[in-house]
Amino acid sequence: PACRGGHTVTTATPTITEHLAAQWAGTGYGDLPRDVVDGIKDHILDTLAVALVGAGTPEVTAVIDASVAFSSSPTGSVVWGTGHRFTPAHAALVNGTSAHARDFDDGGGAGHAGSTVLPAALAVGEHAGSTGQQGITAVVAGYDVGYRALQSLGGFAAHTDRGWHTSGTMGSLGAAAAAASLLGADRGSFADALGIAGSFTGGVWAFIDDGALTKRIHPGKAGETGVDAAVLAVGGITGPRRIFEAQWGGLHSVLAGGVGYPDRALRDLGVDFNVASSYLKPYACCRGSHSAVDTVRALIAER
């Protein structure tokens, strides 16, 4: 192996992160199909709407109260629905929690893509002086990368059945992609951002035993992780390029029993942007409950 730029290079074959970075470091607003732009605008508006409702909930108020002494900054990013400004990473943490607080945020992607990706994108975009078109591009990048990262582990059901909460785990990589896009990362730094985010990703379903509030914080934590990862990568910190494939410590090994699906992760890269993999919710509850809600509503109307 040869050492190059802080990385030990063992193969000339690009890794999953390098493929994703090459795609999104070179993609601009003009490269996005119209239906993708229209679709992501719906998801952005939906996420902002449900976040403004969530911003007033007791759990989000508690997160703000716990953080204000440590995170407040007059030049920070807006904490949605409040008069606060926090450092970008902590603004993403709070705003992602607001978006997910009532389980009304969109689903799909890497779990709840809106509440992981959009808070990271807007927090970084404020500081980077980004345009609306750059913001839209970054959010699409986050949806696409988060979804592809999850597919590399076998998809939602396989990952969830192992006890991982997809919004917290692969949502971190989606948030990192959005933040890296807005920071103008080149393909090397972009890949580093994904590797750093993957190194610190996490989120488990233990909360289901007792209803702990960690579930509502996982998307916000993913946004925080993604912002930090992109900032560090652009600053010169390297991340593992084989974050998925490494036999010891790679995400396929640690999170998926040693089995990875790179073909699923890279299928139609640059052609299918995977915004349509996400959906907007008609009800503020888990999607698995929606059919029951529809049935009860129909019974009430008929009887």
Image: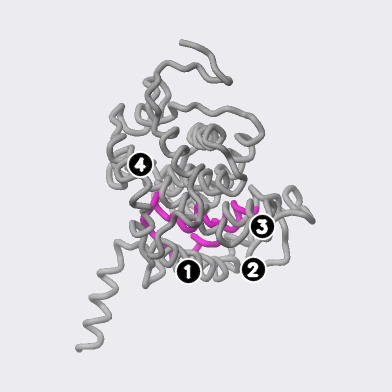
Color style of the picture: one colour
**Nearer to the camera, 238 or 19:** 19
Res. 46 mark: 1
Q: Earlier in the sequence, mark 2 or mark 3?
A: 3
Q: Earlier in the sequence, mark 4 or mark 3?
A: 3
Name the front one of labels 3 and 1.
Answer: 1
Q: Position of residue 61 (x, y in %)?
A: 63, 62
Q: Position of residue 46 (x, y in %)?
A: 47, 69
- Do tag 1 and tag 4 residues touch (Cβ < 8 Å)? no
- Do tag 1 and tag 2 residues touch (Cβ < 8 Å)? no
| Disc 3 to disc 1, C-alpha distance | 22 Å
Q: Position of residue 296 (x, y in %)?
A: 25, 77
Res. 163 mark: 4
| Disc 4 to disc 3, C-alpha distance | 28 Å
Q: Residues within 10 Å of mark 1 (few under 14, many from 20)?
A: some
Res. 64 mark: 3
Residue that carries the numbered disc 2 in the rendered image: 81
Q: Above or below — where is 203 with respect to 32?
A: above
Q: Amino acid at mark 4?
A: Gly
**Nearer to the camera, 43 or 188:** 188
| Disc 2 to disc 3, C-alpha distance | 12 Å
Magenta segment boundaries in residue numbering: 91-119
Mark 1 secondary-structure assignment: helix
Name the front one of labels 2 and 3.
Answer: 2
